[in-house]
Amino acid sequence: MSLTQMVAWDLVLTKKIRDSVAEQSRCSTLLGSVALLEKAADGPAKRNSGKAADVVLRYNFPGNGLNDDALRTLELMVLDKGAEIGAR
């Protein structure tokens, strides 16, 4: 099973954002990964740096044999981690 959560989108791409995502990727997820997706900017980001980014949290885990309660618990854990990362 694969879950992907948008954590943040259309961020002005800066060194601080890159460093923060790299730190989150190294330290904060047990089974998942945090990714920075760079893109051409529109709006405020275009005026500042010309680049923007989205941040996503991805989890992959075997879904075989999971009952509904276990699956719901895993989904809630992923959503909670994404909210925690987005607040930083």
Image (spheres, rainbow, N blue to C red):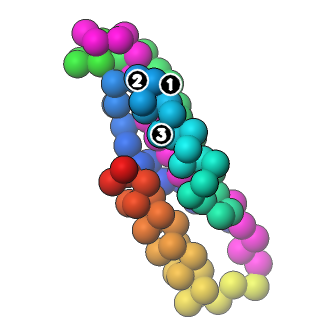
Which residue matches tag 2? 13
Residue 42 at x, y = what percent? 30, 17
Q: How many angstroms separate mark 3 from mark 2 (CA)?
A: 11 Å
- Classify the position of the N terminus by image quarter: bottom right
Q: Is residue 58 visible?
A: no
Q: Amino acid at mark 2?
A: Leu
* First in sequence: mark 3 vs mark 2: 2
Q: Is residue 22 above or below residue 30?
A: above
- Residue 47 rendering spot, x and y as whole percentages: 25, 9
- In the picture shown, does residue 80 fall above or below 10? below
Q: Are marks 1 and 2 in contact (CB under 8 Å)?
A: yes
- Please state the extent of the stretch shown in magenta in the rendering: 47-64
- Quarter-of-image position of residue 3: bottom right
Q: Which residue is mark 3?
A: 20
Give yes or no for residue 84 being in the magenta stretch.
no
- x, y percentage for residue 55? 46, 40
Label 1 sits on residue: 38
The amino acid type, in three-letter code, at marker 3 is Ser
